[in-house]
Image: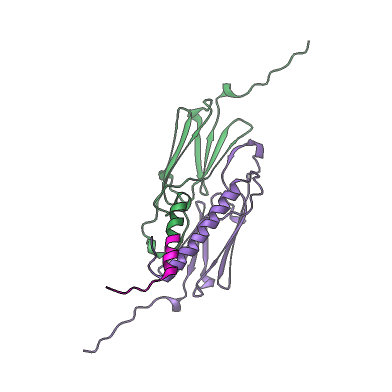
Amino acid sequence: MMATNPWDLMRELSSMHERMNRLWGGVHDRSHEDVTNRGGWQPPVDICEAEGQVVLKADLPGLNRQDIELSVEQNTLTIKGHRRPDDQVREEQYHRIERAYGPFSRSFTLPNTIDSGGVRADYRNGVLTVTLPVRQDARPRQIQVEAND
Amino acid sequence: MAIVRWEPARELAGMEIDRLNRMFSEFYGDPFSRGWVPAVDVYETDEHEVVLKAELPEMRREDIHLTFENGVLTLKGERKFEEETKRENFQRMERRYGSFSRSFTLPNTVDASRISAAYKDGVLTIRLPQREEAKPKQIAVNVE
């Protein structure tokens, strides 16, 4: 895979860096057997921009709504949360623990053209969907090319 | 012969990405090109019921398939990508799409007729009760 322009290249490199961080983080987490103190984990996130809005989706299965915290400050969106272990189950009852528990926090820089007042968030089927409308004046316009002939 | 400007930085970075991509494709490759492995917790309750919890966020019930045969529980499924969203519109894509399959060998004392599964908040909870005769019995020690 060869990137076609320098901008794509930088994006590739930074996403590679991100993936590696996630990879090492994951390996590190797995080595801890303590359910309640697994250190930070990172929920996977998709960000898609289309039709005048930016949509962010984070996989957060099995969280309580009150344990998800979302904030927009300046042009930074922060998702924080905590996955609590089931307090009905004692640690010695587990045969296998692959899910990550404990707190997490991720921040994303938004294009400053977001209408921060119109941000909506919805948690369904274990996925947090954040919809961020792009400000009306920042949306792309079609510009007519005039020809004199 | 055309003269092409040599851009060592781009070449190097390109090679590096290529190498790293191959190296890590096992773990974090293209979201579409390979399967994924949902995280699973397994525990046993005091009533000797085996409980399995699998993280399957944003899936449709009809895309989750569960079978139990000869003491092996198989969980299969496919997380479909929403076709109406174009891939080129994505700025970041870390979530996994595509099919997965995982199997678990369980004690043969599981009562297959009473297995139940429920999907809530992106987590599938499978309850596998054990047959009555398989539960440990308290044996009284007589003192003479």
Q: Quadrant of residue A141?
A: bottom left
Residue at image coords 39%, 76%? A140
Residue at image coords 38%, 71%? B6
* B70 relative to B59, above or below: above
* Residue B41 magenta: no
Q: How far across and how far down the image is residue B107, in percent?
A: 53, 28
Q: How far across and how far down the image is residue B27, in percent?
A: 48, 50
| Apparent colour of chain A | purple
* B5 relative to B34, above or below: below
Span highlighted in magenta in the image:
B1-16
* B31 relative to B132, above or below: below
Q: Is residue A128 visible?
A: no
Q: Among all residues in the image, which is located at the extreme left?
A: A149
Q: Among all residues in the image, which is located at the extreme right?
A: B144
| Viewer-nearest residue: B116 or B93 | B93
Chain displayed in green? B
Q: In the picture, which quadrant includes the C terminus of chain B? A: top right
Q: How far across and how far down the image is residue B1, in percent?
A: 27, 73
Q: Quadrant of residue B15?
A: bottom left
Q: Among all residues in the image, which is located at the extreme front?
A: B1
Q: How far across and how far down the image is residue A98, in percent?
A: 56, 44
